[in-house]
Amino acid sequence: MATISAMTTRPMPVHAGIGLRAPHVRRILSEHPGIAWFETHSENLFAAGGPFHDAMEHIRADYPLSLHGVGLSLGSADGLDTTHLRRLRQLVDAYQPELVSEHLCWGAIRGWHSNDLLPLPFTEETLRLVVTRIGEVQDALGRQILVENVSTYLRFDDADYTEWDFVGEAVKRSGCGLLCDVNNIYVNSVNHGFDPHAYLRALPAASVQEIHLAGFTRKEGLPVPLLIDSHSRRVSQDVWNLYAEAIERFGPTPTLIEWDLDIPALEVLLEEAAHAEEVLNAGRALAA
């Protein structure tokens, strides 16, 4: 694995990056394309050594990096998995990423692990639990993390908060940053019938340090609308419109194009990143 002395931490550029996926690694190493930054899932690097670590050492030397976790299960009634947290700390120490993030959800309990990121009940009890968990992670890593709002397909009846107020309170009380997934906001607004613009307006703008964009799948032939956060296609126009509003509210923010299924040629991701860059440039012009 890489060592701290081999890496240089730099501010995350306020530009559009892409998720680092295996089909593109060889071209990135050989062609060194003009991509502003990369994000990769932390858990993909938990195993010591191997080809992906070898590639990552070269990529990290040339590009800013964000590590994005999917397995900490911040909202589980169980305590944090100490082995998982130790491996994450080792990874962060080794690669010194500009940003480290995790999802505001749960996905494991009593040794059982879900294949999906599961929703939280938006209650005061849950809020206190996740704030404690976030604090434990930040203490263990010795740095601030970002938490991401997740896509969901059901909600708990008991709730003391709206989703957006719950997310905002978790960020404020824990002192973490916010990874605002604009696609997830739009997906949830359709699935649960709320105003995505009200969601954006309620978030603590100063805490937003990264934005995610992805494509969703619309399920047809159902009695109610249902969008699946599939990360399997281009960003929809509705999400682009919401993203432009987010940039107007939060200011230009490092933005990631996510694509995890049916991964296309690298050129397609670069086109999506270029579109995001156009929106960022419009936000810069508006702020000038």
Image: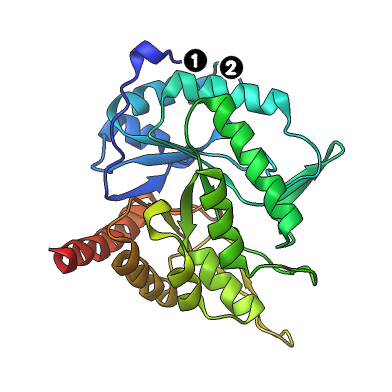
Residue 136 pos. (x, y %): 63, 32
Q: Is residue 95 left or right of residue 62?
A: right
| Residue pointed to by mark 1 | 1
Q: Amino acid at mark 1?
A: Met
Tell me: residue 83, above or below residue 222.
above
Q: Quadrant of residue 24?
A: top left
Q: Using the image, tell me which numbered label, if any, was put on residue 48.
A: 2
Q: CA distance from mark 1 to mark 2?
A: 6 Å
Considering depth in this image, is 108 or 204 the residue closer to the camera? 204
Q: Is residue 259 left or right of residue 17?
A: right
As shown in the figure, which amino acid type bears the numbered disc 2? Ala
Instruction: State whether residue 135 is above or below residue 170.
Output: above
x 61%, y 61%: residue: 166
Q: Earlier in the sequence, mark 1 or mark 2?
A: 1
Q: How far across and down, in percent of the image, does residue 25 sit?
A: 41, 35
> Is the C terminus in the top left, top right, bottom left or bottom right quadrant?
bottom left
Pick whichever, 23 or 169, lies toward us: 169
Does the CB distance between marks 1 and 2 fall below 8 Å?
Answer: yes
- Name the residue: 78% across, 68% down: 156
